[in-house]
Amino acid sequence: MSLDGVLQALADPVRLEMVRRLAAAEDDLPCGGLYEDVAKSTASYHFALLRESGLLEQYVVGNRKFNHLRIAEVEVVLPGVLTSVLAALAPRP
Amino acid sequence: MSLDGVLQALADPVRLEMVRRLAAAEDDLPCGGLYEDVAKSTASYHFALLRESGLLEQYVVGNRKFNHLRIAEVEVVLPGVLTSVLAALAPRP
């Protein structure tokens, strides 16, 4: 996992929204609930980039692919980077 | 200043290095000291992107352009984002 890779993964509105939804759910989610307004093939490209960056883990249950945001692992290698981005995405009180 | 714009500005090794050098210097620096191995025109493009993101301010003294990293201003709008990235860039103790 590299800072550059993580920043590049986060520097896209589609991927940032995928990450935001996973963090907001505080649970693993199937792919379908993580994007809108992009084709499935485009979404697959974005999921692959998130996986390669180390931010995302995917696994299959039955016939559905689930997504796990690796917040704890990212926090160890790059303290505060993902969590501050998530805080900036959260609605202000 | 937007999270998206700041992440996109930071998600490039040339710009990340410019930001790192400015932060490490803890002082404003002329353009020449902030990059290597890229043409001046390429550097100008990266400086423009950093300015547009709100991370950078540039001003002229005599015949030199100086660069100021807007850490304090970024910290108010996006707490922890720039500072955690800078911490990740710093050499580990």
Image (cartoon, coloured by chain):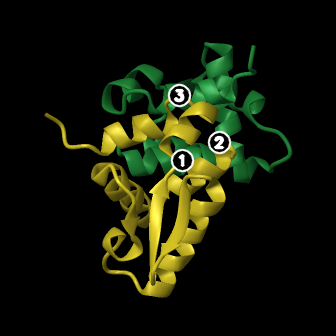
Chain colours: A green, B yellow
Q: Which residue is mark 3?
A: A84
SS at badge 1: helix
Mark 2 Cα-neighbour bin, 10 Å: few <14, some 14–19, many ≥20: many
Three-letter amino acid code at disc 2?
Leu
Furthest-left residue in this view: B93
Question: Disc 3 sits on a residue from what chain?
Answer: A
Residue B17 as seen in the image, left or right of residue A60: left
Furthest-front residue in this view: B62
Three-letter amino acid code at disc 3?
Ser
Is residue A37 among the parts visible in the rendering?
Answer: yes
Mark 1 Cα-neighbour bin, 10 Å: few <14, some 14–19, many ≥20: many
Question: Disc 1 sits on a residue from what chain?
Answer: A
SS at badge 2: helix
Report the Cα–Cα distance between label 1 and label 2: 13 Å
The disc, 1 or 3, on the residue closer to the chain's N-terminal end is: 1
Q: Please state which of residues B3 and B51 is positioned toward the viewer in this rendering.
A: B51
